[in-house]
Image (spheres, rainbow, N blue to C red):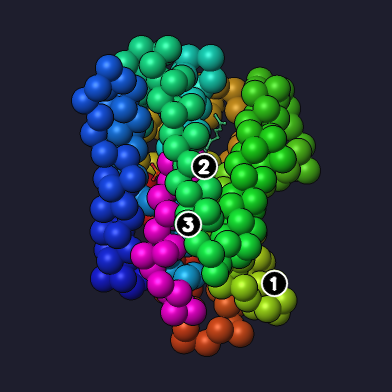
Amino acid sequence: MDKVLYEKYLGLVNEGLEEFLPENNTQRKTLFDAMRYSLLAGGKRIRPVLLLAVCDMFGYDLKKALPFAVSIEMIHTYSLIHDDLPSMDNDDLRRGKPTNHKVYGEGVAILAGDGLLNKAFEILSQSVVQSSDECYKKARALNYIAKSSGADGMIGGQIIDLEWEGKKIDEDILRMMHTLKTAKLLKAPIMASCELLDLGEEEKKALEEYADNIGIAFQIKDDILDVEGSSEKLGKNCGSDNQNLKSTYVSLFGLQESKNMLSNITQRAVENLKIFGDKAKFLEGLALQLKIRDN
Ligand code: GRG
């Protein structure tokens, strides 16, 4: 992967997050502190980086793309805060730090997640209403992000996860769960960019297939890392899938077969980019990096 370009996108995202969610020292300080605690705790920022990278490929002004990038990261961070709650996965470590509810308590953690989710849609809708010339394209991008993170997307995946805990799952349900829970929010930045860029059908289809493939590859790698990764590098506790009696690619197919699947799907993602030639070098490198990532 082109690390220099990744750092450039990462820098823009981190500056954007600080700009769109500054400190607030009013009566609501605790809420803002809790929101900022998880949001600014680090993380790979893959979703916003994907959005900026696709926009950059086609020369879209990254300043105009930034509200979309930071909003997706806010939605992702809210999902992590809620996922870590005692009523969900009950985790005490995230992004190398104590989870939100461990620091602020459950009530504040719930509100911090809610606050981030709403802030994301406030930023997105603000970007739509402020833009007279690109209003419709931006609204389509917003709509894609809303669908991907809601009951037909990430939240829909989470309910399947919750209801199948401790039960033996088959491949179809496992795939559906991860497509909704993980892959949809990784696909959202890519498809939202397609809307912002108003790409044609052929380019959109290629990017959609790439997005579907890296979405599933990301989850398979996540399951592998839960078994053989290092808690220190991951910044979260390993082995939690096993502890929470979760069905995963590894529990269903074994470690070696999961690794084979990961390689094949990553290869397919790389092939999806062929029509773009050198313009897609960063996205190609990112897919390969996701396969070998250790956090
Ligand atoms: C609570 C509505 C709700 C949804 C939760 C995202 C999610 C759904 C749960 C997180 C649990 C989990 C480990 C999912 C697997 C894939 C995933 C989303 C991992 C975390 O994303 P990364 O690796 O994290 O991009 P960073 O910290 O780098 O941003």
The part of the image, by quadrant, that contains residue 113 is top left
**From the viewer's perspective, is 132 left or right of 173?**
left
Residue at position x 43%, y 41% in the image: 74
Q: Amino acid at mark 1?
A: Lys
Question: How far from the left and from the top, in percent, is residue 224?
Answer: 50, 44
Which residue is disc 1 drawn over? Answer: 205
Q: Callout 3, which amino acid? A: Gln
Dot 3 corresponds to which residue?
130
Q: CA distance from mark 2 to mark 1?
A: 26 Å
Residue drawn 45% across and 37% down?
119
Nearer the N terminus, badge 2 or badge 1?
2
The three-letter code of the residue at mark 2 reads Phe
Q: Is residue 57 magenta?
A: yes
Q: Secondary structure at mark 1?
A: helix
- Helix, strand or loop under label 2: helix
Residue 131, image x, y percentages: 50, 62
Q: Nearer the viewer, residue 253 or 87?
A: 87
Q: Nearer the viewer, residue 144 or 217?
A: 144
| Magenta region | 56-75
Q: Which of 83 and 134 lies nearest the eye of the viewer?
A: 134
